[in-house]
Image (spheres, grey):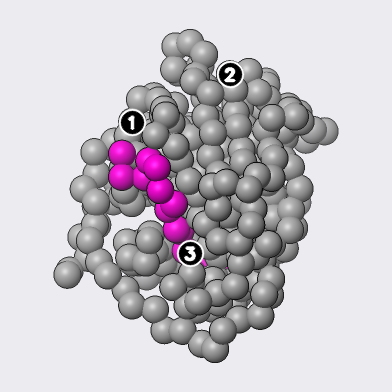
Amino acid sequence: MKLKTLAVLISLVFAGCGGGGSSDLPIPEAVAQPVCEAKQPSNSFSTTGYRSLSTTTWGHTRVSSPVRLGQASQRFEVRAGDCAADPGWSDCANDRERSEITVDQRFYANQTKAISWSFYLGQEFQDSPTVKTTLGQIYSWHENKPSPIRGPVLQFELWNGQYQMCWHKITGTVSAPSERCQYYALTTLQEMKGKWTDVMVEINTSKTTGYAKVWLNGRLLVDIKEPVIFTEADYHFVKYGLYRSFVSRHGGPLPTQVAFFDEVRLADRISQVDLRCDLKPTD
């Protein structure tokens, strides 16, 4: 079926897609069949990482159920007030709450990378009509440049019943950049409850010939045919878990949120991260 996408440009005040956005974008429909290689060796493209701005004992644990593949998954939990700080940033001072993992593996300019993760939301999961919960993001890092040059490039956000991807599209110059959030609809919270959702991203980081594609549950829903990277970064990386920005907009404490993540992979080709290609578990 023909791919139907609707992109909405939203001005941002801060990095992290804090601005408003459409909450009722139509969900595109497209089926993409995988092209698979020989069975991949176990753990070849799995990731390692560390907790980012989260220190609670309940924020991140390994559990045996539910799992997407293998014997274990990662459980993330964020409660109202769960925030932390490091020498360069304070979530508490900037109206944020989170429990995330930052993936150790980095990638660089002029590379093509395939990234995947699967997450599970229970039937009891609640979102907010005004506060966005990020469930996965691809970050661009510049050691000596400020936001918005340094920050998320692709950010996968849930709010008001919709799961959407924000492309942080930057224009202007390095000294005077302008950032806007271009949204792509992926699915709804109701569709995701009680089941695993598989996300795959193919991104090329060239600032002149780059592109990005996103599959959800094997369906190609985003196909950006222009560079998504504004300027060459020192490196790029992946974060996953639960991240809530501008939490005061909810008008009170946000509900506790729990999400399970599994099969987080980083490789050179989509066939190396596509679960339909009979991949072995990352456990």
Report whether 65 appears left or right of 56.
Answer: left
> Residue 195 lies in magenta, yes or no?
yes
Check the image and report above or below for 99 versus 282: above
Q: Mark 2, residues whose alpha carbon is within 10 Å: few (<14), some, or many (≥20)? A: some
- Helix, strand or loop under label 3: strand
In the rendered image, which quarter is residue 147 located in?
Answer: top right
3D distance between C-alphas at marks 2 and 1: 18 Å
**The magenta stretch spans which residues?**
190-207
Q: Which residue is mark 2?
A: 80
Which residue is drawn at the image coordinates 51% and 44% (left, top)?
A: 135
In the rendered image, which quarter is residue 35 located in?
Answer: bottom left
Q: Is residue 194 visible?
A: yes
Query: Going from the N terminus, do you reach mark 3 or mark 2 first?
Result: 2
Q: Amino acid at mark 1?
A: Asn
Which residue is drawn at the image coordinates 55% and 65% (left, top)?
A: 115
| Residue 149 percent location from the top left of the image | 60, 49
Which residue is drawn at the image coordinates 40% and 42% (left, top)?
A: 194
Q: Mark 3, residues whose alpha carbon is within 10 Å: few (<14), some, or many (≥20)? A: many
Quadrant location of the C terminus? bottom right
- Please identify, in this view, whether the residue under mark 3 or under mark 2 is nearer the observer: 2
Q: Mark 1, residues whose alpha carbon is within 10 Å: few (<14), some, or many (≥20)? A: some
3D distance between C-alphas at marks 3 and 1: 24 Å
Q: Looking at the image, which is closer to me, 215 or 125?
A: 125
Q: Which residue is mark 3?
A: 201
Q: Which residue is mark 1?
A: 160
Q: Amino acid at mark 3?
A: Val
Which residue is drawn at the image coordinates 31% and 45% (left, top)?
A: 191
| Residue 192 percent location from the top left of the image | 37, 45
- Helix, strand or loop under label 1: loop
3D distance between C-alphas at marks 3 and 2: 30 Å
